[in-house]
Amino acid sequence: MDISLIIGLVVAFGSAIGGFLLDGGKATSLVVGSSFLIVVGGTMGATIISFGISGTLKAFKRVFFSYNKKNEPNPEHLIEKISEMTNKCRSDGLLVLQSMLSDPELETENYLMLKEAMVLATDAKSVEVLQDTLSADIESYSAAMQQDISVLEGAGGFSPTLGIIGTVMGLVQVLSNISDASKLTASIAVAFIATLYGIVFANLLYLPFANHLRSFMKRQVIFREMMVDGICMMVSGESTRNIQNKLSLYYHAFPNCEDKYKAGIDN
């Protein structure tokens, strides 16, 4: 799990709750089950109506997938892998790629497109066909990821509105018991907790998740573009060194890879 998720949640919720406590508030007053049910349940229901059950579940699964460090694209490993393939192809021909298709890593999501590219290369497809086919694959992947992002953005839009609905419902309940003046102030405060939940969940969970997934998608798209360039250069007969130099230019698009990018330029 990406430690930034834990740190971000602790800082965000800790700051909000801490500020409330510093003003003399009580943490228990922020816990209202009915408000939570209206906001979270209503948001999930509206999201499911908009995107379907499978689409909603897929989006949230994708969020957890993106926060898993093991699923983060590794450009250095990809360059090493394509370099190894290039060396073997230059000595034994493109058909040697068939013996490399059994690599279990090629079955993982990050490298499945590389396997597709290897199959196309062994079928003696031209560079133009390779580029067209793999570019279509990237576009399809981007569209699917954008759909997941839309689900999270939709939830971020529904949540504050459901908070307002919960508050209105709470105020209706308050006004129906307005004769009991001793409980009026406390009841109004409880009613506004729904609005608080709606705003907090939207701005500290759903929308940040959408932004993170968008950044993850951009890195994945660039990672796949590296595959396209690498395989096409290999099929064109480029040397391993030239391929490494070209692919190293992608390093600056990935976090913590600036040194490798500079090293690639110097090389």
Image: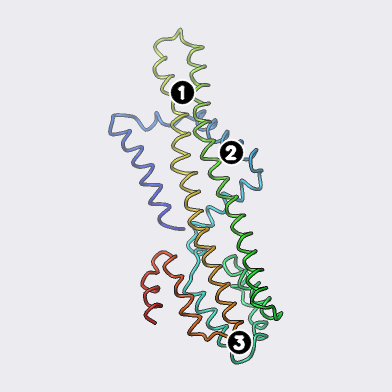
In primary-sequence order, the first of circles 2 and 1 is 2
The foreground one among 41 and 260 is: 260
Which element carries disc 1, helix, strand or loop? helix
Q: What is the CA distance from the residue labelled 2 to the residue labelled 1? A: 21 Å
The foreground one among 23 and 135 is: 135
Tell me the kind of residue under disc 1. Ala
Q: What is the CA distance from the residue labelled 1 to the residue labelled 3? A: 69 Å
Tell me the kind of residue under disc 3. Cys
Residue 231 position (above or below residue 203):
below
Q: Relative to 262, is 213 on the left or the right?
A: right
In primary-sequence order, the first of circles 3 and 2 is 2
Residue beneath the point at 39% across and 31% down: 28
What numbered label is drawn on residue 44? 2
The foreground one among 197 and 21 is: 197
**Picture coordinates of residue 210, whole percent (x, y):** 50, 48
In primary-sequence order, the first of circles 1 and 3 is 3
- Of all residues, the one furthest to the front in this rendering is 128
Q: Which residue is mark 1?
A: 191
Between marks 1 and 3 in the image, the one whose residue lies nearer the viewer: 3
